[in-house]
Image (cartoon, rainbow, N blue to C red):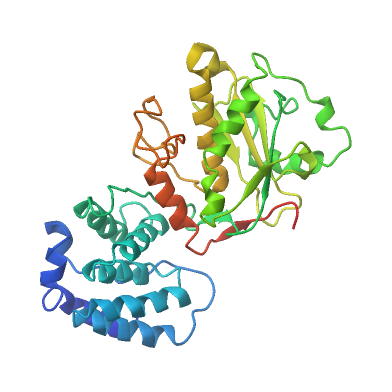
Amino acid sequence: MLVTRGIASALALVLLLSVVVPFWCFLSADARASAPPRKSQKRKGKVAPNVEALQKKAFACYLQRNYVEATKLFKQCFELDPGDVSVNYYLGASALFSNDVKTAEHALCRVVVMSTPNSEFSNLAMKSLKQWRTAFHGIEPYSQVEDGRLMRWEKGKGPIKIWVSDGLQLPRGFVGPELDTEKCKALYSMFQRPGFFRQLETVVHYVPSYRDMVKNGINDWGWVASEGIVSFEFTEDPTKADVLYFWCPESGAGSVGRTFYPWTRTSNARCIVHIETEYLRKWGSRVPTELRRTSAHEFGHVLGLTQHSNNLDDLMAGSGKTVSYREMTSYSSSSAVTKNDYATLRALYELPAGDLYSTMGR
């Protein structure tokens, strides 16, 4: 949806007139050189008819530097149309100018998460977060847009049931790099066959203690329940699991673990994760730390963080340096999840998703 005509026509005056001075406080020179972008995130579905009038009223308050009232009105716009990137951005800017840092942080993080990297709104939001780094505790969220949409579980639902195999690997033809999307869909029906899991073989170089290490990594995300994001629990019955962890000698594609999502509109869809054992052989005493981190990374994908962070210190970095838990800036003292990972997941679950994963219990 385009920003309303009233807003669009006023945007040309934003930097020339009433917004030049306040924007100077937190936007860098190149951001101030051009007006903010005018298009919002494309979304499916209809928007409530009163949103346009409310947006005009909110933006009028913004132009008048009545940022407290603008924040109030943009909050109402967000409640009616949470997937509008322009509404999120101006809510963040209004809140920042009215010293409502918490509201500004949430809104600006949502802008980054819902936008493609280096898009105009995303760049403006990131510059705000960096310019006010101290107020925002240095957080750097990252985009989660994949094929133009966001994907996650339904907020507040669950529990997501997780089964971690004790060293079992998938059948021949489905192991490691052989596994792909279409084969995952074939596995969904195979999981329902009586005796399927009893026939699976144990992967080479597996150590029984690995299973608990994987569970420790998954539990690094245990705070998501208290945050009202989603809840999860472990199960010993793979036929009832929404997420299944398997093992493989080598994962392929330069990775040590891979996550396949529960494809929507597919019967009995599950989330399938596999972790390779070969890479663990070189770590010696660091195996518990490395395997826990790998497991936590893959479960971040399970929760909906489909895209990697460019910050090498983040748990959800695609690749990066090996650091100890003590060296990391973590969300908690015992978790590998960083504040950037936390802020990104929180924002993802504050936004409408293009695809919602379903649990087997539904």
Whether residue 179 can be seen here: yes
Quadrant location, the N terminus: bottom left
Whether residue 1 can be seen here: no
Q: Position of residue 224 (x, y in %)?
A: 53, 50
Q: Is residue 189 above or below residue 195?
A: below
At x 43%, y 40%, the residue is 332
Q: Position of residue 76 (x, y in %)?
A: 41, 78
Quarter occupied by residue 110: bottom left
Quarter occupied by residue 326: top left
Q: Is residue 162 left or right of residue 116?
A: right
Quadrant location, the C terminus: bottom right
At x 56%, y 51%, the residue is 225
At x 28%, y 69%, the residue is 95
Q: Is residue 239 above or below residue 59?
A: above
Q: Is residue 167 above or below residue 98?
A: above
Q: Is residue 151 left or right of residue 87?
A: right
Q: Position of residue 197 (x, y in %)?
A: 81, 31
Q: Is residue 53 above or below residue 19?
A: below
Q: Is residue 113 left or right of residue 135?
A: right
Q: Position of residue 132 (x, y in %)?
A: 21, 55
Q: Is residue 296 left or right of residue 337?
A: right
